[in-house]
Amino acid sequence: MFRLDGKVAIINGGAGGLGEACAVAFAAQGAKVVIADVNLEGSKKVAEKIGAGAMGLAVNVASEESVAELAKAVVEKYGTIDILVNAHGINIKMPAVDINIDNWDKMFQVNVRGVMIPCKVIGKIMIEKKKGKIINFSSVRGIRGTDGGNMPYGATKGAVDMITRMLAAEWAPYGINVNAVGPSVVMTENFRKAVAPERLEILKSKTLFKKFLDPEDIAAACVYLASKEADNITGLIHYVDGGLTAVG
Ligand SMILES: NC(=O)c1ccc[n+]([C@@H]2O[C@H](COP(=O)([O-])OP(=O)(O)OC[C@H]3O[C@@H](n4cnc5c(N)ncnc54)[C@H](O)[C@@H]3O)[C@@H](O)[C@H]2O)c1
């Protein structure tokens, strides 16, 4: 179960954090993995770490031209695209009264437009072959509020949830599954740098198991959603959150 042998998977945002963990897990399940990121050096490093068959490319998910180039390069190399993972994302924390509009727009560019465009461009390829799996990265913050200047981030993730559900409905006739994962706090390098230690303790105390998740916990959920075992799952926001959303 949960094998991805021979499947061609694009992991946007795969140069680090949760995307990297997904790329590693997908390759271990037999997928041909394309790591795509604005950080080309990082993409190449992850591809190198994974080894034969993996490819590291540059993409700006917010640019239709860039995503089209990525899709073209992948189809030229592997013949098709079976799985799309949108694992990129940014969070610029801003108290609501001090919202910087440029930063607000930047977050929507990357987190929302940057999910819509890859879905649009690669969804077209999947529609033609009447098969495909798309996994978007949401967050518990798409459904649960919090303080700490996270309103813009939560707004983008709420949008990702509805992109996921709407596309699931629109593309079910084409055999395409569109799901999302909703992590709570995962101790990635960037997260550790971005959050003050005392806030980390508060966040930890809100989980039922009183601990943070590992990137591999999220990667495992993505492997499941990408596998044929999840063929009947679509439009789901799959929370991997240590119980955070169970208790609000
Ligand atoms: N880490 C957590 O605790 C956590 C919790 C909930 C949700 N998430 C979500 O999971 C996803 C991954 O988070 P992470 O912690 O691994 O983040 P990360 O910052 O470690 O990695 C994100 C990657 O996205 C890439 N990226 C940024 N803008 C891009 C663009 N325009 N085009 C292409 N790539 C771009 C970055 O270069 C980076 O490699 C995000 O959507 C995030 O919101 C993370």
Image: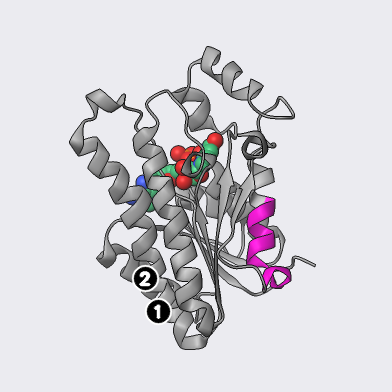
Asked whether 23 or 222 is in front, the reply is: 222
Whole-percent x, y for residue 111 in the image: 37, 49
Asked whether 193 or 209 is in front, the reply is: 209
Kindly identify the amino acid type of the residue bearing the numbered disc 2.
Lys
**Looking at the image, is 232 positioned above or below residue 219?**
below
Q: Is residue 35 magenta?
A: no
Q: Are marks 2 and 1 in contact (CB under 8 Å)?
A: yes
Q: Which residue is mark 1?
A: 124
Whole-percent x, y for residue 193 in the image: 47, 24
Give the number of the disc on residue 120.
2
Residue name at image x 32 percent, y 70 percent? 68
Whole-percent x, y for residue 163 in the image: 42, 61
Magenta range is: 220-231
Element type where label 2 sits in the image? helix
Kindly identify the amino acid type of the residue bearing the numbered disc 1.
Lys
Mark 1 CB near ligand 1 (8 Å cut): no
Asked whether 56 or 16 is in front, the reply is: 16
Residue name at image x 50 percent, y 82 percent? 79
Prevailing SS of the magenta stretch:
helix
Does residue 41 appear in this view? no
